[in-house]
Amino acid sequence: MALQRLPKPIFVSKNLKIFQVSSGNSELRIATPKKLFKLAVTRNKIKRQIKSIFHVNELNENNDLFVIMVFKPFLLLSYQEASFEICKAVKS
């Protein structure tokens, strides 16, 4: 899905930007740019953390596509802080 086709984000902060698109199946797409996160280990850690938050809190039950763009300050958040921010954004 191209960036120009995304609707307005449902949540924007200095840590991440979340888009929600209605679709036939539930998907989660996470953008961790190589320009901001140089090591693949870091990018993969962020993706695993966000996938875990969605799975544990059962956030993607309604067959929507979520696109999450992650920014540099996300690394400073603990798992609890990241979980609270994502849950607050998706459930609202």
Image (cartoon, rainbow, N blue to C red):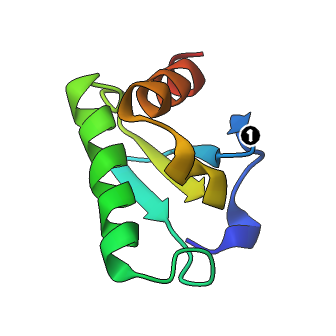
Locate the N terminus by quadrant: bottom right
Res. 88 visible in picture: yes
Residue shown at the point (58%, 57%) measured from the top left: 70
Question: Considering depth in this image, is 34 or 60 the residue closer to the camera?
Answer: 34
**Image coordinates for residue 19, horizontal then vertical, percent:** 62, 46
Answer above or below: position of 42 versus 89.
below
Answer above or below: position of 28 versus 77.
below
Residue shown at the point (30%, 74%) measured from the top left: 41
In-image side of 29 versus 37 (left or right) = left
Q: Amino acid at mark 1?
A: Val
**Image coordinates for residue 15, horizontal then vertical, percent:** 65, 46
In-image side of 68 versus 49 (left or right) = right
Q: How many marks?
A: 1
For mark 1, does the 10 Å Cα neighbourhood hold few (<14), some (14 to 19), or many (20 or more) residues? Answer: few
**Image coordinates for residue 81, horizontal then vertical, percent:** 48, 27
Answer above or below: position of 55 versus 42.
above
In-image side of 19 versus 37 (left or right) = right
Secondary structure of residue under mark 1? strand
Question: Considering depth in this image, is 2 or 38 the residue closer to the camera?
Answer: 38
Res. 71 visible in picture: no
Residue shown at the point (63%, 75%) measured from the top left: 2
Answer above or below: position of 17 versus 72.
above
Task: Read off the residue under disc 1.
Answer: 12
**Image coordinates for residue 60, horizontal then vertical, percent:** 34, 33
Locate the C terminus by quadrant: top right
